[in-house]
Amino acid sequence: MHPEKLARINELAKKSRTEGLTAEEKQEQEVLRNEYRRAVVGNLRGQLDNTVIVEPDGSSYRPKDEKKK
């Protein structure tokens, strides 16, 4: 996610706490937050997909995704 969008999310959050948001700003905030959530989940999924567990005996394996059964 671009730093400009993160800054805008923070700007809207601060404005929401201090003076309130217009309907358009609330909609913009929701769209930006959803985009941020998708980015975070995507990054986490990428990290988990590349995770390897190493056993004390030196063997390694990738954990299975329970949802992909």
Image (tube, helix red, strand yellow):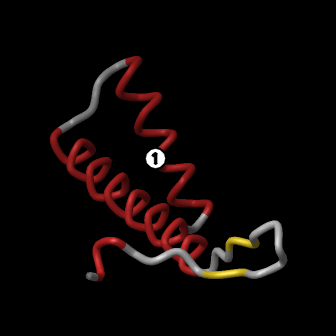
Residue at image position (44%, 64%) is 41
Q: Amino acid at mark 1?
A: Ile
Is 17 left, or right, of 7 in this rendering? left
What percent of the width, then of the height, locates residue 45? Answer: 48, 72
Up-down relation of residue 54 to residue 23 (above or below): below
- Decide: few, some or many residues near mark 1? Use Cα within 10 Å; few <14, some 14-19, many ≥20: some
Up-down relation of residue 30 to residue 66 (above or below): above
Residue at image position (46%, 67%) is 39
Residue at image position (53%, 65%) is 44
Q: Quadrant of the N terminus?
A: bottom right
> Residue 36 falls in which quadrant of the image?
bottom left
Q: Quadrant of the C terminus?
A: bottom left
Up-down relation of residue 61 to residue 35 (above or below): below
Kindly state the secondary structure of the residue where label 1 is placed: helix
Q: Residue furthest left?
A: 23
Q: Residue furthest front?
A: 57
Is 2 left, or right, of 41 in this rendering? right
**Which residue is label 1 attached to?**
9
What percent of the width, then of the height, locates residue 35? Answer: 37, 64
Residue in the foreground of this view, choosing between 67 and 41: 67
What percent of the width, then of the height, locates residue 58? Answer: 84, 78
Residue at image position (62%, 61%) is 3
Residue in the foreground of this view, choosing between 17 and 37: 37
> Residue 61 falls in which quadrant of the image?
bottom right
How many numbered badges does the structure rendering display? 1
What percent of the width, then of the height, locates residue 16? Answer: 35, 27
Residue in the foreground of this view, choosing between 53 and 23: 53
Is 43 left, or right, of 19 in this rendering? right
